[in-house]
C-alpha cells in the first residue's frame, strides 16, 4: 500500500509545480513511510510514498520506468496474481530483476497497453504516463478499494490518493460543492464521482481516465458487474456451494501474499468468520485476529468474536473501546478523512487498526459480504415493507395518505420533541403515535423500491436541508431503480456502487493507512463479486434469511449456533457520547457565534436542533453528529 500524487499541465507550468508535488507526497507520508520518489518531465510530474509489503528491496522504488522506456508509473495497492502474469510475460521475452508486483504491472502495460488492467486480480490506483504519445492514464480497481482523486480545470490535472494531496497544489482555490454537501447530509458520505470541492472528483471504480496531449479527457469503464448480473448461473445449490468455497479459498489465500506479517479483523459475524475460518484451515499458518469491544452490550460483538476465535484456534486480541479513546480519535477526524465523513464506526475501525499495527503490517477486512449476499438488515426491512404495501388496495392507500397529510403530524412531533416532559411519556407519544404515522404516510407515497430505499436511508430530509442550508435544488442522485433485476438485487447493486466505496471502503482505507498498515478486502476479489451477482437471488437471500449460500459454506467450518443470531453491525453509542463526555466537542464546534460567522448554515435552525438534542430527542442524534463531523472537517481545512 502506498500513496500516489501527480500533475499534468497543458501549458504555463508554474515554477512551483515541482515543489507542490513534493509537498503533496509529503502529505501522504502515513500511507508510505518507507520510501519516497519523484519524477518530472516537462509539464508532467509523478510522486510516490511507499509502504513496503512485497519486495522490500530498493527494486520496488517508484516512480518506475518500463524496460522499453515508454511508460512511467506510480501505483498504490496490490495485484495478487502478479506471479502468473510474470510467467506469461517471461514467455513473451520480458525480464525481471525484482520479486514484487510493481515491475510486473508496468511490464504488463508495456506489453498490452492500459487494457492490461483487465488481467489484474487486486486492488489498485495507478497513474501511467506514456512518453510515446504524451498520454496520461489514471486507473482504479473494479470495486473501489483504493481511492483516487483528481482535479481538472481544462489546462491542468492534478491527482492523489487523498484530498490532502490535492490541497498541496497551489494553483487552485478550493470551493465547496453544494450538491456534495446535500449528499453528505442526506446519507453521511459523498458518493463518487463527486468530492466536497468543485472541479475535484473521485475516479469511479472500474474506470480509467485518459488524457491526451492537448487535454482531450475521457473516462470509460473497463469492467461492470452488470455483465455477471445479467447472466445467471444454472447449477444446483450443492454445485454452487462447492464453486463458492473454492473461489473463497483462492481469493482469501491471494490476500495472504506478503513479505510482512498479516492479520484479520474479526467481529464474529458471518463475513469475518468466513475469512478467518478459511484462512485458518487453508492459509498454511496460524492467523492473528483482532476485535474491538464496547462496554455497552448493545454494541459489543467481542464475545461472539472470541468464541469463534477459540473454535478456530487463532491468535486473538480484543481491545475495549472507551470514551477516552473517542476523545483521542475525534480531534483527528477532519485530517483523517479530509472531506466530510459521517460514519462514526470510523472510531472503532481506527482503534482496531492501531491495535493490529502493533503486530502486523497487513490486515484483512471482510467488507462486501452484505452487498454480495444481501445481508443488511435494511434489505430485510425494505423487502418486508414492499410486500406489505403491495397487499394494500390502491384506494385504501390513497385515502390513508390523504387523511395523514391533512393532520399536522410533523408539527406535533416537533413540539413533543422540544418539550422537557418526562422521558418515558415523550418516548411513548412519539414512538407510538407521531413517528409511525409519519412513516406510514411517507412510505405509502413511494412508488418503487428505489424511492422507498432512498427515503429510508435519508438522515436529513430535503425540507430540513432547506432550513439548514437554504438549499432549494433538486435531488442530485438517482436511486436503485436504475438497476435491472428484482428488488433485492437492485438494493445490493446500489450499495455495491455507492455505500460500499463511498463509506465502508473509505473508512477502512483511511483507518488502516493512518497507522501505516495495508487493508485488504478478500470478499471484493472481482471473481467473487461476479460469482455472487451471477447467482439466482434465492441463493443469496432465501426464505430462511440472508446470505444463504455463504452460510452453507461457513457451516462446514464454524458451528451454526455460533453464528445464527440477529445481525448486529459495527456501531458506537454516538448519541450517548455526544450527550455525555463528548458534549465539549459540540460546545466547541457548534457554538452559535461560530456557526453564524461561517455563513454556511442557518444558525437559528442549528440552535433549534441542538435544543431538541439536549432535551433528549434521540432522532436528532445522527443529525447532530453529521453537523459535528462537518465542522471538525471545516475547522481543519477551510478555517482561516
Image (tube, rainbow, N blue to C red):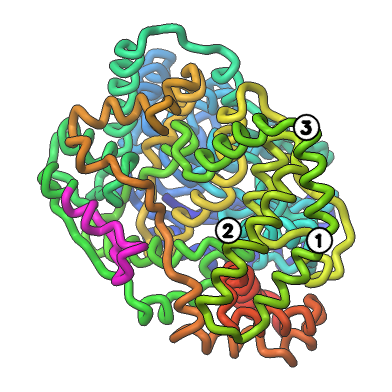
Q: Which mark is residue 394?
A: 3
Circle 3 Cα neighbour tier, 10 Å, few/some/many (<14 / 14–19 / ≥20): few
Question: Which residue has dot 2 on it?
Answer: 162
Name the front one of labels 2 and 3: 3
Question: Quadrant location of residue 151?
Answer: bottom right
Residue range highlighted in magenta: 290-307
Q: How many marks?
A: 3
Horizontal and vertical percent for residue 235?
40, 7
Seen from the viewer's position, the closer of residues 406 and 320 is: 406
* Mark 1 crowd level (few <14, some 14–19, many ≥20, 10 Å Cα): few
State yes or no: discs 3 and 1 in contact (Cβ < 8 Å).
Answer: no
Of helix, strand and loop, which one carries label 3?
A: helix
The residue beneath circle 1 is 407
Q: CA distance from mark 3 to mark 1?
A: 20 Å
Report, in whole angstroms, how far the alpha carbon at label 1 lies from the one at label 2: 48 Å
- Looking at this view, is 42 or 87 the one in front? 87
Q: Does residue 369 show up? A: yes
Q: Quadrant of residue 104?
A: top left
Above or below, 281 relative to 172: above
Whichever of labels 3 and 1 marks the residue nearer the N terminus, that label is 3
Amino acid at each position: 500500500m502506498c500513496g500516489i500524487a501527480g500533475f499534468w499541465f497543458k501549458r504555463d507550468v508554474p515554477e512551483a509545480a515541482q515543489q507542490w508535488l513534493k509537498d503533496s507526497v509529503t502529505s501522504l507520508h502515513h500511507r508510505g513511510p518507507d520510501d519516497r520518489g519523484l519524477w518530472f518531465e516537462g509539464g508532467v510530474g509523478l510522486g510516490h510514498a511507499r509502504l513496503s509489503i512485497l519486495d522490500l528491496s530498493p527494486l520496488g522504488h517508484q516512480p518506475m520506468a518500463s524496460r522499453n522506456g515508454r511508460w512511467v508509473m506510480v501505483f498504490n495497492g496490490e495485484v495478487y496474481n502478479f506471479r502468473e502474469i510474470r510467467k506469461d510475460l517471461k514467455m513473451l521475452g520480458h525480464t525481471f530483476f525484482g520479486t514484487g508486483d510493481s515491475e510486473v504491472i508496468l511490464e504488463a502495460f508495456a506489453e498490452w497497453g492500459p487494457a492490461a488492467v483487465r488481467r489484474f486480480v487486486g486492488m489498485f490506483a495507478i497513474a501511467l504516463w506514456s512518453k510515446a504519445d504524451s498520454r496520461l492514464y489514471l486507473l482504479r480497481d473494479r470495486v473501489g478499494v483504493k481511492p483516487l482523486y483528481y482535479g481538472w480545470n481544462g489546462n491542468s490535472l492534478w491527482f492523489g490518493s487523498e484530498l490532502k494531496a490535492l490541497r498541496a497544489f497551489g494553483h487552485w482555490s478550493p470551493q465547496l460543492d453544494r450538491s456534495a454537501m446535500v449528499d453528505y447530509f442526506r446519507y453521511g458520505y459523498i458518493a463518487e464521482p463527486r468530492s466536497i470541492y468543485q472541479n475535484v472528483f473521485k475516479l469511479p471504480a472500474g474506470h480509467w481516465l485518459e488524457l491526451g496531449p492537448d487535454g482531450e479527457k475521457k473516462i470509460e469503464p473497463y469492467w461492470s458487474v452488470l455483465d455477471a448480473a445479467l447472466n445467471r448461473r444454472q447449477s444446483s445449490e450443492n454445485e454452487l456451494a462447492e464453486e463458492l468455497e473454492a473461489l473463497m479459498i483462492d481469493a482469501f489465500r491471494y490476500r495472504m501474499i506478503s513479505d510482512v506479517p498479516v492479520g484479520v479483523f474479526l467481529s464474529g459475524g458471518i463475513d469475518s468468520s468466513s475469512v478467518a475460518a478459511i484462512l485458518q484451515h487453508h492459509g498454511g499458518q496460524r492467523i492473528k485476529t483482532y476485535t474491538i469491544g464496547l462496554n455497552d452490550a448493545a454494541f459489543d460483538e467481542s464475545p461472539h468474536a472470541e468464541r469463534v476465535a477459540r473454535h478456530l484456534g487463532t491468535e486473538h486480541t480484543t481491545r475495549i473501546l472507551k470514551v477516552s479513546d473517542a476523545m483521542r480519535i475525534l480531534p483527528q477526524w477532519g485530517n483523517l478523512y479530509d472531506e466530510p465523513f459521517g460514519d462514526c464506526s470510523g472510531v472503532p475501525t481506527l482503534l482496531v487498526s492501531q491495535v493490529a499495527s502493533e503486530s502486523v503490517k497487513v490486515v484483512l477486512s471482510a467488507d462486501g459480504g452484505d452487498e454480495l449476499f444481501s445481508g443488511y438488515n435494511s434489505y430485510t426491512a425494505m423487502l418486508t415493507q414492499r410486500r406489505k404495501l403491495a397487499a394494500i388496495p390502491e384506494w385504501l392507500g390513497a385515502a390513508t395518505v390523504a387523511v395523514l397529510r391533512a393532520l399536522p403530524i410533523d408539527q406535533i412531533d416537533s413540539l413533543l420533541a422540544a418539550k422537557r416532559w418526562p422521558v418515558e411519556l415523550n418516548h411513548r407519544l412519539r414512538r407510538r403515535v407521531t413517528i409511525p404515522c409519519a412513516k406510514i404516510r411517507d412510505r405509502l407515497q413511494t412508488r418503487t423500491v428505489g424511492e422507498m430505499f432512498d427515503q429510508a436511508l435519508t438522515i436529513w430530509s430535503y425540507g430540513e436541508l432547506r432550513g439548514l442550508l437554504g438549499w432549494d435544488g433538486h435531488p442530485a442522485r438517482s436511486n436503485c431503480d436504475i438497476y435491472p433485476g428484482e428488488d433485492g438485487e437492485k438494493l445490493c447493486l446500489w450499495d455495491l456502487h455507492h455505500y460500499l466505496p463511498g463509506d465502508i471502503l473509505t473508512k477502512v482505507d483511511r483507518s488502516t493507512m493512518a497507522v501505516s498498515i495495508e487493508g485488504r478486502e478478500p470478499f471484493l476479489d472481482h471473481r467473487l463479486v461476479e460469482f455472487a451477482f451471477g447467482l439466482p437471488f434465492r441463493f443469496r437471500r432465501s426464505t430462511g434469511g440472508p446470505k444463504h449460500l455463504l452460510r452453507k459454506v461457513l457451516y462446514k467450518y464454524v458451528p451454526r449456533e455460533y453464528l445464527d443470531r440477529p445481525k448486529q453491525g459495527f456501531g458506537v453509542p454516538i448519541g450517548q457520547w455526544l450527550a455525555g463526555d463528548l458534549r465539549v466537542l459540540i460546545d466547541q464546534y457548534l457554538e452559535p457565534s461560530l456557526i453564524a460567522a461561517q455563513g454556511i448554515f442557518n444558525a437559528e435552525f442549528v440552535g433549534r436542533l441542538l435544543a431538541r438534542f439536549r432535551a433528549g430527542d434521540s432522532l436528532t442524534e445522527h443529525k447532530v453528529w453529521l453537523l459535528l463531523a462537518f465542522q471538525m472537517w471545516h475547522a481543519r481545512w477551510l478555517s482561516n
